[in-house]
Amino acid sequence: MGMEGIGAPVKRKEDRRFITGRGRYTDDIALKDMTYAWFVRSPHAHARIRSIDTSAARAAPGVVGVLTGADLAGDKIGGLICGWMIHSKDGSPMKAGAHPAIAAEVVKHVGDQVAVVIAETRNQARDAAELVVVDYEPLPAIVDPAKSRAAAAPQVHPEAPGNLIYNWGLGDEAATDAALAGAARIVTLDMRNNRLVPNAIEPRAAIGAYDPAEEHYTLYNTSQNPHVARLVLSAFVGVAPEHKLRVVAPDVGGGFGSKIFIYPEETVCLWASRRIGGRPVKWTADRSESFLVDAHGRDHVTHAEMAFDADNRILGLKVHTIANIGAYMSTFSSSVPTYLYATLLSGQYDIPAIYAEVDAVYTHTAPVDAYRGAGRPEATYVVERLMETAARELGVDPAELRRRNFVRSFPHQTPVIMAYDAGDYEAHLDAALKIADYAGFAARKAEAKARGKLRGIGFSCYIEACGIAPSQAVGSLGAGVGLWESAEVRVNPVGTVEVLTGCHSHGQGHETTYAQLVNERLGIPIDQISIVHGDTDKVQFGMGTYGSRSGAVGMSAVLKAIEKVEAKAKKIAAHLMEASEADIVIEGGELKVAGTDKSLPFFQVALAAYTAHNLPAGMEPGLKEGAFYDPTNFTFPAGTYICEVEIDPDTGKTEICSFVAVDDFGKIINPMIVEGQVHGGVTQGLGQALLENCVYDEESGQLITGSMMDYAMPRASDVPSYNVTTTETVCPGNPLGMKGCGEAGAIGSPPALINAITDAIGNNDLSMPATPEKVWRAIRAVA
Amino acid sequence: MYETTYHRPGSIAEAAAMLSKAADGKLLAGGQTLIPTMKQRLASPSDLVDIGGLAELQGITVGGGTVTIGAGTKHGEVAGSADVAAAIPALGALAEGIGDPHVRQMGTLGGSIANNDPAADYPAAVVGLGATVTTSKRTIAGDDFFTGMFETALDEGEIVTKVAFPVPAKAGYAKFPNPASRYAMVGVMVSKGTDGAVRVAVTGAGPCVFRVPAMEAALAANWSPAALDGIAVSAADLNADIHGSAEYRANLVTVMAKRAVAAAG
Ligand SMILES: Cc1cc2nc3c(=O)[nH]c(=O)nc-3n(C[C@H](O)[C@H](O)[C@H](O)COP(=O)(O)OP(=O)(O)OC[C@H]3O[C@@H](n4cnc5c(N)ncnc54)[C@H](O)[C@@H]3O)c2cc1C
């Protein structure tokens, strides 16, 4: 490991501009003659639009235009799409309702847009928006997924009778039923995976700019995947042709999934810019809008049964889940409760039979889609709460029950598609037990009791799948896109390097880690390497960043391109030094002839490539190579989390005393960045388990937790100082041996905390978030 | 935010005059409640009269068994004051527990009590310590100042200038913060005056700060947490929301009252 190569805890290059306030976000961009959009949004969860009167708004000061769903339809702008086809058990395709960027006939959730006002200033647009008169006929609404299929429940889309989008199954039902029938013991649990609001620090924003002379569109957007946005907006929504649309995602202040999707607002900004004659149109969400219309996360209702034999080995697992999709199917919503969820239900365990059935339902709530972990936190919660519950009911140690059932030989084919390629689950369990001083827990519990506190310990042995690949496999499962990645490595004549990637950094630190990879291979200092991403005019195509894919998939593509650069550089160096190509090695920024003292600095080789005065016969000038990389499998990060809590029985308040995370992420590029990812992920997971809850009013469908006053985000004081460490099994599926670390913390931590609290209070009947009142009531219920 | 006209007066008298001239004027102190409300377009004053910087409203003085705090004094100044810590430590601790450092750098005592949010902390101090509120027109006993949810005894255009807190023999404050907003889900100030009079004032639990006579009587007889065992307020009149039912808040009132007594020593 060099000072700046793979494995070095290099400080993040991008942080200078972020910390000094010089990041350049979408809202920082000011284009000439820019106008501002404000959306008129539905105050009702469900209502028919009788009429819209925009005349007063049009006459208001500064107003440039007012547009409605009728205008959108008149221009033949298509609806938004869901890009992953799921088929029901009976073979029928999922039943997706229409998703217009501006509702024309019926609004389906509070915040649904019904018109957009464009004005000289944001405040003028907002003032005028209040003058748009919408005559609504309010209709009854349904927000609870568990009740949405009832015969009397209000219907969200005529295309989906009974609000059912699909009834999907995975695994062998007959074999699972047989396993349950032959079990010595069955452990049953009903669970709710609470609905979350993503809340990235930077609210979503878009600037649409149409150039009438060139008939060309530019979109600046808070996007995690600008190329996918361009593809969807051109090929499906039809706002602009793909070659006439440039999408730029500049600095993006956090995404957590919520900025993957192609939303109505950016669609409207692009289209509106053309409608008003080419002046750019900017929209920046305020925090209230973020709560109302950003895609939410989770929202599952699950019943699960796990069967054990007399030796405490798992025989089978049967799961039924109702997944709330919200009022519209967001871009990847259908894949989250299916292929990103049920495929992980085997956990770290050797389970002979698994069957999962998922009903995806519409409700009159904001769309629900991928949020940090996307399906895998929900799966982990099911498996790891069941394991802890089983240990209690079977009267065995929770660590030992897990150990007994671990997968131990690889590759391991689970009954739910996934083939685990590598891992050593006992290694992280043992490490975590030691760090957490499991042996000393009984003494700590007794000491807490003397202070009047209830102390508990909880485990979570999670596994997840990253990379969301290979393309052929996801295609066969219904994905509308391939999930490979592309890269281009451009060596400049002076030997500095630009790396172009189709991934996108919105907090992950790619400008540092990608440079570390180049440094490792070419020996160039990282301050002579720039990473270019987030602009469809610069990077030819790519799939963006989500699913912890930028390392395992994105950097593998970079590596392939570097290898091509190396091969060409070696040819040139061999030619210049009159040596055999096979004898050239690249070391410390030089190309050397092995076994001699002959060498050329990298920059001289680069310069020779561009002067082209003396290249091998027939060689093209230049030193620039591109590569596409399609992985051969998912990657499988796994780990053990152990959480210890103390509960105040008088108030039910939980204090998280310690949190131990031992993760196997395979090879690590930058341990400092990895640790940061774990800190953030664990805090998000603990936030879900302890604090966060998105609540709609059952009757009116109003969003009750519409601001930070009621939606409880975790603060530093809510969490302990984490104890984070890693073990390593190299991932055989990609050349760098990486698995991915971006989501693990959020995936693994919620059950660890709930298991700890239920252990402390001696009552397993507790749902997330474990608010003080819920815990207080659970204590009293068993007192 | 709707457009508004901003004024910066040089004195309380000038502020009062500006306010009376405005069509729908509002005082602006720390802006920690008013500005967010305006940004959400839930308030639209025609004029803002900014008294945040008025020298007349600043400062903390201790003397004659009283701590007097100017209405414009920031929460952070009260929290950081050695004089307050020496005379009424419970008051400094209460101020330290308001919001976050940003809010404490801006928010003021006068703004807090004039606003009378049912979950605000200061009302518990004003009532629980038996303070007296002075305004641009008169003095008002703390017990009479808070009249209902977001309502006070202040007349139109009346400006709070200072609050005088008698130094008690003992006092303690215990707060159970709302997990989202960190306002008080329940906050209880208990005090025992130099004359032996006991006060128990509860904020957050009901629509407005209130005293608990049964607890006061029990503590007057026996100043100890155990004296409150078995004494509970009725849940009937308490607040209920997604963070806590009325029954849970009733439980917290007793728990926090006991902790406040323990903190008072
Ligand atoms: C994030 C956040 C967290 C908070 N947490 C807490 C908390 O935990 N506990 C808590 O108690 N409070 C909390 N607050 C509220 C904070 O304490 C405010 O400072 C306070 O409620 C209002 O004081 P202000 O000086 O900011 O008043 P402003 O917002 O300027 O004014 C509030 C109202 O009082 C009027 N007013 C102001 N000064 C006077 C005066 N001298 N005489 C008459 N009327 C006046 C104004 O006209 C206005 O109607 C929080 C606020 C925020 C933003």
Image (cartoon, coloured by chain):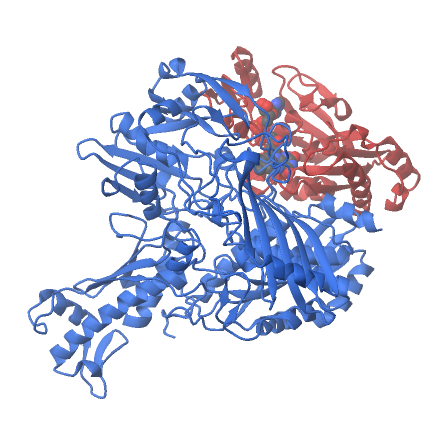
Chain colours: A blue, B red
Depth order, front residue of A258/A410: A410
Q: Position of residue A589 (x, y in %)?
A: 25, 73
Q: Position of residue A101 (x, y in %)?
A: 40, 32
Q: How many marks?
A: 0
**Residue that sits furthest to the bottom in the current view:** A595
Depth order, front residue of B139/A240: A240
> Does A290 sit above or below residue B51?
below
Residue at 67% x, 63% y: name it: A179
Residue at 51% x, 30% y: name it: A108
Residue at 38% x, 43% y: name it: A222
Q: Quadrant of ligand 1?
A: top right
Q: Is residue B89 left or right of residue B107?
A: right
Q: Is residue A539 visible?
A: yes
Q: Is residue A433 visible?
A: no
Depth order, front residue of A732/B252: A732
Depth order, front residue of B141/A353: A353
Q: Is residue A554 left or right of residue A47?
A: left
Residue B168: image quadrant is: top right
Q: Position of residue A56 (x, y in %)?
A: 40, 13
Q: Position of residue A623 (x, y in %)?
A: 18, 65
> Does B27 sit above or below residue A621?
above
Residue B78: image quadrant is: top right
> Does A69 sit above or below residue B265?
above
